[in-house]
Image (cartoon, rainbow, N blue to C red):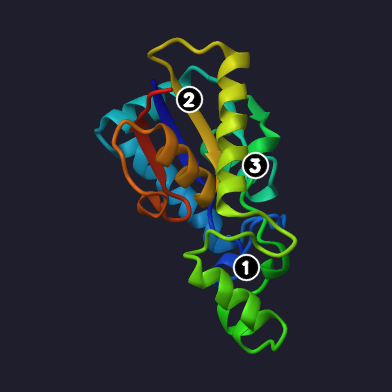
Amino acid sequence: MKLFLFRHGSTAGNVVKKYIGATDEELCEAGREEVRAERQALFCKDSAASECYKAIVSERRKIFCSPMKRAIETAKILFDSNPIQIESGLNEMNFGVFEKKNCDEMNCDRVLQPLYQAWLDSNCTAKCPDGESKAEFCERICASFLSLVGKENFATDAVIPIVCHGGTINALLERFAVEKKDYFAWRTAHGAYRFEEIEL
């Protein structure tokens, strides 16, 4: 079984390095261009991922997608005629009070600065105030994915296309990828993808 994981293109908040997790932003024009460029590259490349992508498009297979605007818009650019099934549990980490702020803004805020520094000191694993911890987030993502697998009854050699978020990709591949890597080692650029063999 393989996961074909697409990260959404950039939003206005992403461009200025804000924490955009539970915040429901649409793509900015630069983000749309990132996704269009990746789509064009996949149609032109000669690779296993490219061939799989072209088959998914031509056969109009179902695409699974986070409910966030930026993911849905990305899915529609990549797979304009494919049916899209929303999977609410695959949305990005909730960064709580850090949402819609970047590191410079928080370092200049007397209330947020110590909270943000404590989170950084935990290697970004502690619970974000009013948000999720890394462990809570990863458990939610992996449980949602296993529920999806159970509902869809995929074949053992299936390729599962999901349009989602950077953190979602990290959590899924840290847990399920055959190649074992740390969560942060699976970082994926906006508008890019991962095509990985998994084991459940």
Q: Residue at x 61, y 35 (%)?
A: 65
**Measured Cα–Cα span from mark 2 to mark 3:** 16 Å
Reading the image, the residue beneath label 2 is: 160
Q: Nearer the viewer, residue 60 or 63?
A: 63
**Measured Cα–Cα span from mark 3 to mark 1:** 17 Å
Disc 2 crowd, CA 10 A, few/some/many (<14, 14-19, 20+) = some
N-terminal of the pair, mark 2 or mark 3, is 3
Q: Nearer the viewer, residue 39 or 108?
A: 108
Residue 76, how many percent across, how many down?
A: 60, 38
Q: Secondary structure at mark 1?
A: helix
Instruction: Give, as a three-letter code, the residue at label 3.
Output: Ile
Q: Is residue 12 left or right of residue 49?
A: right
The answer to whether mark 3 and mark 1 are in CB contact below 8 A is no
Disc 1 crowd, CA 10 A, few/some/many (<14, 14-19, 20+) = some
The answer to whether mark 2 and mark 3 are in CB contact below 8 A is no
Residue 190, how many percent across, how many down?
A: 47, 55
Q: Residue at x 32, y 45 (%)?
A: 181
Reading the image, the residue beneath label 3 is: 72
Q: Across the whole image, how many numbered discs are drawn on residues?
A: 3
Q: Residue at x 57, y 29 (%)?
A: 145
Q: Residue at x 55, y 43 (%)?
A: 138
Res 111 quadrant in image = bottom right
Residue 81 to residue 139: above or below: above
Reading the image, the residue beneath label 1 is: 13
Q: Secondary structure at mark 2?
A: strand
**Measured Cα–Cα span from mark 1 to mark 2:** 29 Å
Instruction: Give, as a three-letter code, the residue at label 2.
Output: Ile
Instruction: Give, as a three-letter code, the residue at label 1.
Output: Gly
Residue 1, how many percent across, how many down?
A: 39, 20
